[in-house]
Structure formats: C-alpha cells, structure tokens
Image (cartoon, coloured by chain):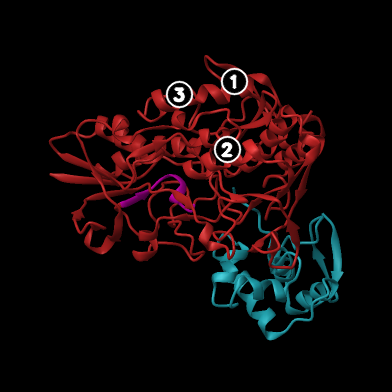
C-alpha cells in the first residue's frame, strides 16, 4: 500500500491517490490534495466536502446527481464549476473518502 | 379477508402475481394487480428491432394472458400511495386499500429531463430504442440513413439494462458492415461512466472489443444539453460531441406517483429506497419493492427481477406468517451481451463480485463462456425469449441459481482482461 507525506503526516493512499483510511483525513490534508488538483478551497468547497464525508459515513451511494440535487450546491453545473473534470471523483479524493464506485 | 395489492404488471409484477397466487389461500388472501398499459413487451427484443432482426409484432403480447386466474386486474394509472393509511388512489378516482403492497412499476426513459433532447430533433435525428415506438422509428431511420456520425449517449449513469447501449454499438457495427457502408459511418459511444462498463475487468474486456470494432469510447461524458441547432451534445464541463444521428438512452425515471407519494430518493429519479437484501421498502414494513423501481445497487434488468422474485416470494410468505425475513438478495445479475456477427458474451455478477471470466454452468444447458465472445452465448440470448414467455413470467423454476456462484469462474486476481476479449 503506497504512503504519501501530506501536511507533515504519513497518509495511506491507494494507487489512484485516494485515502484508504478516512480517519487520517484532516482539513490540512484536504488543502494539500486540493492544491495538487489545482483547486483553492472556498467555503462552498468545504460545504461539499463535509456533505460527502457525512453521506459516506451514513453509507449513502454517492452520485454526481445526488450532490447536484442536495441543498449543498444549486445544481450539477455548480458542482462541476467547483470541482472541474470529474467533480465526484475529485471531491471524494479531497474529502478523504473512497472513490465512488458505480453500482450498476 | 386480506388484500395483497401489486402495482405494475411488467416482468416483476407478473412473476410475483403468479408465484404468490399459487402459494396464498384464496379464502384468506384476495389479490389485485394494477397497470396502466395492456401490452406486455419483451423488452430485450427492443434491441433487435432497429436492425430489422425482429419484427415489432414479435415483442408484444397481451399482459392479461400471463396473469393467473384468481387475481383481479385493473387497467388504470396509479396516482398516489398513502402508506400511513394503506391506500392507493388511481387516476380514475378509485381508491384501493391493502394489507400488503408490492411495488413493481419499473422505470421509463424520460427524454424531457435533458434540455434539447425532446425537441425538434426527436424522432428526426434523435431516437431512443428502449421503447416500442423509439425502436420501430429508429428501424425506419436506419433503413434509409446514408451514413455519418452516429453517437450513442447515456444521459444518466443509472439506466435499465446497462449493457444494451454496448450491444447497440456492436450490432450497429455489424449492420453497417453487412450493408457495405461501414466506412461511411463513424460510431461513437459516449458514457458518463469511466469506461465501456462499470466494473473493471468487464470494462477492460468490452473496451478492447469496442476498439477492435472501430467504435470510439468517450468516457466521463455527463450530458447537460442537446444543442438542437448545432446538433451537438454538450456536457456540464463543456465537452462537445457533434452528431448526425443520435441514439439516446434518456434519463430513466420511476413512475410519477412515486414523487407524488413522497416515496422517492434524493436523486429525484423516483427510485424507491429499498433494503438491499430483504427487498422491503426502507420506511414501510408492509411494502415490498421489486425490479427496476428499487434503488438497490445492482443492474436494473429482467434477470435481476427474476432473482429478486425468488427472494421476495420467500420474504412475503415469511412476513405474512409473522416470521423474520430470512431470504437475502445478493444483487445477482446475469446478462448476455450481443457482440455482433452472430456472437455474444455473458456476464454474471452480484453486489460483491464483479463479472469474471470462466464458464457458466447451467444444469441441462451446459457450459456457457463468461466474458468471451461465442456463438453458443448468442444462441443462449435468443433462446431466452422462449424461456421468458413460457417459464419466467409464470414464476416457474429456471435452472440458474438465485444466488451468484463462483463455480466455473476465474478468481479476480487471476483474471486477465486482455485475454478474455479475444
């Protein structure tokens, strides 16, 4: 299992860079992953990350549409604007949760 | 007298009516089934209509012929379910009460969900093939089409029969080749998924098959709108795909009454939150959900409804007898995938195990090949039509195990996706 040094900590990640233990996540870790992804985190980004972490903890099946229909963002378009090029994959990586797997 | 009410007389509802009428005492349980449409469509056959392989008449039969005696049938649209009162209101004003409700109203493609899709181009240069009308109109279109850029697009990741868009691409390749015009047609497969299919090994195998057949796969393509003037598909992140002919798989939605009854999930697609294993509705003990209209994380497909029906029969009987619901659905799906030129491949998987290569042992039918193109798989797909009408709908036993089995499968760590596509 690969490990990376993020925000002064040693973090376990998988081959695609997703945290394998969401307990190792901290806001500093999020900021550093976001930086690598070219995203400066605003309050709106943090709302989305918090929502994803909550939903993941509840065992929800996450989709772009689900986030778009939530109250956290106004629309799917806004989710894309916040996290361009694959918003759910990117936001999940920054939120320290596993890459959402399609279930169909 | 108790009342068991089934909403929907499609594949799942018809199976449940047949299974439960045979098990429940008519002196204790009366049964009613409600559906708004009198025709039963053999939906797997829709795939073959655009290419002239099936005549449209072939896929249509009266629903009434497949429902058992002793079940009252009402031809009406459902308007609202009120679980707190155990009542269902129909659009014609009738009100039904129930002691036990089974919901099997499926999903329908809704092209109006995507701006520009259901407009001037609809049934001119943009078609679906998951409906009787769409499939037949597309057959006429393909018959006279002179070629150009054919784009296949899925509006949303969750659709019924997730392999049918791939099959359409493969059969289009065959169709245009046999017509001697393959060089005049560019086939492009756009998908919101990461690859040709959702599960990694099958996705790799199917992607390399697409490549071999000269079909371009465009992944992570999440459609925002159809630009009718430019004839371009546009995604939320500004990607564009121009088309001459669009074969669309529109957003799949459950029935409108689900939203009206406030029973849908947060995605606003009218899928009903359902226990993944017992198939009981998440918020209501006396409601069970089966088939495409559930939100369980597996394919929406007739084979899934069939495996669910075996589980649901047991659990409904347990519920009626006041016993714990011990039968557990594992997400089992089993799909033949037409790959063109008289061959097909086969996948078999569940919630936990992705499609793997190997052999698929069916007692009496012999070994089929998993994730491998063979003629036998193609004949299996064709033979299924008879099984569907004569065994499956009646709720008869079919020699395929309800729970997925690892028998004959190559374990995940040993599977080589490069080899299985060949």
Q: Which residues are magenta?
A: B287-295
Provide the secondary structure element on which disc 1 rests: helix
Of labels 2 and 3, the one closer to you:
2
Near-viewer residue (B332 or B56): B56
Near-viewer residue (B380 or A12): B380
Chain A: give its colour: cyan
The residue indicated by pointer 2 is B139
Going from the N terminus, do you reach mark 1 or mark 3 first? 1
- In this view of the protein, can residue B130 be seen by the observer? yes
The residue indicated by pointer 3 is B387
Compared with B193, B355 (above or below) is: above
Q: Chain of mark 2?
A: B
| Residue B20, magenta (yes or no) | no
Q: Are marks 2 and 1 in contact (CB under 8 Å)?
A: no
CA distance separating discs 1 and 3: 12 Å
Image coordinates of residue B325 in percent, x first then y, are 36, 44
């Amino acid at each position: 299992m690969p490990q990376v040094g993020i925000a002064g900590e040693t973090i376990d990640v998988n081959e695609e860079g997703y945290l394998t233990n969401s307990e190792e996540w901290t806001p500093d870790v999020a900021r550093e992953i976001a930086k690598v992804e070219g995203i400066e985190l605003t309050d709106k980004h943090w709302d989305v990350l918090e929502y994803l972490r909550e939903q993941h903890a509840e065992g929800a099946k996450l989709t772009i549409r689900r986030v778009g229909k939530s109250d956290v963002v106004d629309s799917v378009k806004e989710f894309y604007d916040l996290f361009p090029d694959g918003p759910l994959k990117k936001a999940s990586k920054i939120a320290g949760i596993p890459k959402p797997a399609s279930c169909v | 007298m108790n009342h068991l009410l089934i909403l929907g007389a499609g594949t799942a509802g018809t199976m449940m009516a047949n299974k439960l009428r045979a098990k429940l005492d008519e002196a204790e349980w009366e049964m009613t089934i409600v559906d708004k449409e009198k025709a039963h469509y053999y939906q797997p056959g829709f795939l073959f209509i655009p290419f002239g392989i099936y005549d449209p008449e072939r896929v249509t039969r009266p629903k009434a012929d497949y429902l058992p005696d002793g079940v009252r049938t009402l031809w009406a649209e459902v308007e609202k379910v009120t679980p707190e009162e155990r009542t269902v209101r129909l659009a014609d004003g009738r009100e039904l009460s129930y002691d036990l409700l089974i919901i099997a109203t499926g999903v329908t493609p809704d092209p109006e969900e995507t701006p520009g899709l259901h407009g001037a181009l609809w049934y001119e240069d943009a078609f679906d093939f998951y409906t009787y009308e769409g499939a037949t109109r597309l057959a006429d279109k393909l018959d006279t089409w002179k070629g150009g850029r054919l784009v296949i697009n899925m509006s949303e990741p969750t659709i019924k029969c997730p392999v049918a868009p791939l099959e359409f691409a493969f059969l289009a390749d065959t169709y245009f080749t046999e017509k001697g015009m393959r060089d005049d047609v560019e086939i492009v497969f756009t998908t919101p998924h990461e690859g040709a299919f959702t599960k990694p090994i099958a996705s790799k195998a199917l992607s390399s098959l697409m490549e071999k057949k000269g079909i371009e796969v465009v992944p992570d393509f999440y459609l925002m709108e159809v630009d009718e003037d430019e004839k371009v598909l546009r995604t939320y992140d500004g990607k564009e795909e121009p088309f001459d002919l669009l074969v669309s798989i529109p957003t799949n939605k459950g029935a409108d009454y689900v939203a009206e009854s406030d029973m849908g999930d947060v995605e606003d697609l009218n899928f009903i939150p359902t226990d993944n294993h017992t198939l009981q509705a998440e918020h209501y003990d006396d409601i069970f959900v089966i088939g495409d209209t559930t939100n369980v994380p597996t394919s929406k497909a007739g084979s899934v409804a069939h495996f669910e029906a075996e589980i649901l029969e047991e659990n409904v009987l347990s519920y009626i007898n006041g016993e714990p619901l011990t039968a557990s659905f594992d997400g089992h799906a089993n799909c033949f995938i037409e790959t063109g030129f008289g061959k097909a491949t086969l996948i078999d998987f569940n919630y936990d195990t992705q499609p793997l290569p190997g052999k698929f042992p069916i007692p009496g039918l012999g070994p089929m090949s998993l994730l491998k193109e063979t003629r036998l798989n193609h004949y299996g797909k064709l033979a299924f039509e008879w099984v569907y009408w004569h065994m499956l709908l009646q709720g008869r036993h079919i020699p395929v195990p309800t729970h997925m089995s690892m028998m004959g499968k190559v374990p995940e760590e040993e599977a080589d996706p490069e080899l299985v596509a060949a």
